[in-house]
Image: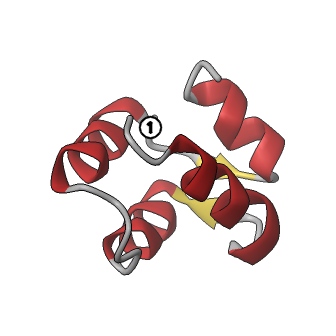
Amino acid sequence: MHNRSEVLTHLREHQKYPAQKVDLTRACENMADLEPEDRQWLAETLKEKRYQSASEVIENLGW
């Protein structure tokens, strides 16, 4: 993950919750600073579920 800090900021400050995996991956697609490999990693790593908070997403990512 090249831009972990950017993703964390987005998850904490810009993403609305609750959010499904698809909502999170779509939001990442619109982040210009996120490398394609990082988008793919997020899509493969996030579980299919409804997330209630940024903390829950971050925990799921193993961060």
**Is any part of residue 16 visible from this angle?**
no
Q: Residue at x 25, y 55 (%)?
A: 35
Q: Height in image: 3 above or below 13?
A: above
Q: Secondary structure at mark 1?
A: loop
Residue 20: percent from left, percent from top = 55, 60
Q: Residue at x 41, y 74 (%)?
A: 31
Q: Residue furthest top?
A: 62
Q: Is residue 56 left or right of residue 40?
A: right
| Quarter occupied by the N terminus | top left
Residue 50: percent from left, percent from top = 63, 52
Residue 39: percent from left, percent from top = 28, 52
Foreground pick, 26 / 63: 63
Foreground pick, 50 / 33: 33
Q: Height in image: 24 above or below 44?
A: below
Q: Is residue 27 left or right of residue 63?
A: left
Q: Is residue 8 left or right of residue 47?
A: right
Residue 37: percent from left, percent from top = 18, 44
Foreground pick, 56 / 30: 30
Q: Height in image: 17 above or below 30?
A: above
Q: What's under tag 1, amino acid-wise?
A: Leu
- Residue at numbered disc 1: 46
